[in-house]
Each structure stands twice: as structure tokens, then as C-alpha cells.
Image: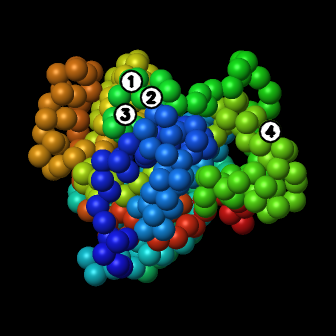
Amino acid sequence: MTQETDKIIDEVDLRLINALQLAPRASWAQLADALELDPVTLARRWSRLCAAGNAWITVSPSTRVFRQVCTAFLEIRCRPDRCESVAAALVEHTFAVTVEYAGGDADLLVTAGTPDLEGMSRFALDVVATIDGVESVRTRLITQWFTEGSRWRLNALGPGERSTLPSTRTPGGLSGASALSAPDRALLRALSRDGRRSWSELGAELGISAPSVRRRLDRLLHLELVTMRCEFARPLAGYAVLATFWGRVPPARIEDTGRRLSREPETRNCFAVHGPNNLVVQTWLRSVGDLGAFEQRLADSYPDLDIRDRSVVLRLHKLLGHVLDGRGRRVRSVVPDVWESTA
């Protein structure tokens, strides 16, 4: 990698990324006022970030869609000499949405999605468990999603700057079909690779007009079936630690606790799982030294939550279908499609 592409993400880049988290498909002209930079400079900076794999925009099914399929958190133990090869094999599977090499009880943590419970059973037993080097697989079915990674935000822009960004909300209430059709899924696959592709380019790939593509995406966003997200190489921007906490909450309190945890600024994912440790929260932190302070805050603010285990990701191999290098930069994509047949 050249010195230019290895460059650390700077403060101007962080402000641009934050703006694109809030308005992922806004034009450079629309973003110029908030960032106080001209559109050409913004476009050049974004092109540089993308070329280096330091930032990218993608699309994800929302928690509303996750409820329609089967999702699970897989805790995998491997032979010590086979962890890397097992991770490499899992990265190629479209059902393995995120693959993490963890420092904890399990060697690999995988967030997986399949069309149904039968599909998850086949994936865990017939695919994951048969990979050479896998010693055991513990599958924790996700029973409720409280938040997912697209809602995590930087805080690089001030309130006044954020208020000048174009709104991404569409008027009206949530009405209409809540399932994703085959054309919807084709659009998601196209946007997963580059969420800022032009309407005409998307239309040419999908065989429909540019206005039709725009209307389809607007509908999916309006119904909150999908979310756009701007991702970046967090270790290069000072967010070096991805930590996972397993907690136990009384069943009557899990809904309230999960929703409150979802609003914590560090929270990346929060979901309920079946089993004795019934709540999982994953967080982005700046350093290992922040772990103790965050856990103490949980103890002080959530008396119903008993943290039973925790782990720190040593390497994030794959994030929402994007394969990453050791510094968190996107190398390529294995676009997830949790609706594929598992037969």
C-alpha cells in the first residue's frame, strides 16, 4: 500500500464521514455549506477515501427486515493453528454477514442471517461445523433487534452544522408491504457495493429507468425497510476497540434495557438472544482503557443488567459483507443475501 493510501483519516475526513452518515446520498453541493468546503474538494476527498478503502457507503436491511428472517450470533471455537483459515472460509459465505476474531471464550464471532430457522440449522451444522479446524459452534438465535450498526454516529459536526444538512426523511407514515421483493433485493445488492452510485448507473445494471430506481429506494427508506450507512476504517480514525458484552436481564426488563442501551453513543449493535445470557451489546471504543469505564457506567445506569462475559475483537475480518484488512480498510465485498436458498 502506498504512503498516500495508508494515510490516517484526518479531522476534515471525519467531518465528511459524519455528514455522509447523516445524509449518505446528498450531493456535494448540498454538503458544501455544512462542511464549509467547495463541492470539488469534497468529491476529491471522498474519492481518495474510497480508493484507499478508508471509507465507503453501503446499504443494509433494517431491524424491521431482520425480524422477517432468522438471525443468529455464532460463537465458534477453533484449533489454535486454524483460526485464520476458518475465518477466511467464513468470509466467503453470504450468510456470514460479519466475521470477528475475538479475544474471549470464543475464537470467532459471526453474525449470520438465513431465510428461516431450518436454513440457520443447515448453515450452522452443515457448513460452519464442517469447516476444517472448527472444534465447536454455539448458535445463539437473535430473538429481538434493538439497534444495528447503521445508527452509530461520529460526533464530528456541531448541532448547527448538522441542521444545515439535507433531510433524509420522507413524508408520510409507515404503510405498504413490509417484505422485500426480488427487485428490491437486486437494488440492495447493487447499492451494497457502492451506496453513492448514480441513478442512471443503477438503472442500467437493473434494467429499469433512473427515476424508477430512485422511487424504489425512496420507498424502501420511507418504509424503514433499509438503511444507508457510511462506514470507515475505525482504527485509522481513533476507534480501535470493538467490544462485545454478554448480559443477563430479567425477561420482564429486557425490552426497556435493550432500548435504553441502544441510545448509548458507544453502542454499535444491541440484540436479545435465547439462552442464560440473553442480551448482547457491541460497542465501538477508542482504547482498551475505556472498557472498564464503560462497564462501570453500565453497572451504575442499568441495575437490572448483569454483565456475565465480555470480549474484545482482535481483528474484524468482515463487516456487513465487506472484507477488511488488518487496519479496518475495505478490500472487497461479499454482498450478503440472507434470502438465498440454503438447499
Q: Residues within 10 Å of mark 3 (few under 14, many from 20)?
A: some
Mark 2 touches mark 1? (CB < 8 Å): yes
Q: Position of residue 72 (x, y in %)?
A: 50, 49
Mark 2 touches mark 3? (CB < 8 Å): yes
Disc 3 or 4, which lies upstream in sequence?
A: 3
Q: Is residue 228 visible?
A: no
Disc 1 or 4, which lies upstream in sequence?
A: 1
Query: Which residue matches tag 4?
Result: 215
**Callout 2, which amino acid?**
Arg
Q: Residues within 10 Å of mark 1 (few under 14, many from 20)?
A: few
Q: How many numbered marks are there?
A: 4
Q: What separation in Å lies between label 3 and label 4 (alpha carbons)?
A: 30 Å
Q: How does the figure colour the protein chain or chains?
A: rainbow
Badge 3 element: loop
Does residue 285 appear to the left or right of 97 in the view shown?
left
Query: Which residue matches tag 2?
Result: 162
Q: Position of residue 218 (x, y in %)?
A: 73, 36
Query: Which residue matches tag 1?
Result: 159
Rendered view: 72 above or below 158: below
Give the image quarter of residue 45: bottom left
Q: Position of residue 295 (x, y in %)?
A: 18, 35
**Callout 4, which amino acid?**
Arg
Q: Which mark is residue 157?
A: 3
Judged by depth in the image, the label closer to the viewer, 4 or 2, is: 2
Badge 2 element: helix
Rendered view: 149 above or below 7: above
The quadrant in which the N terminus is found is bottom left
**Callout 1, which amino acid?**
Pro
Disc 4 or 2, which lies upstream in sequence?
A: 2
Q: Nearer the viewer, residue 47 or 246?
A: 47
Badge 4 element: helix
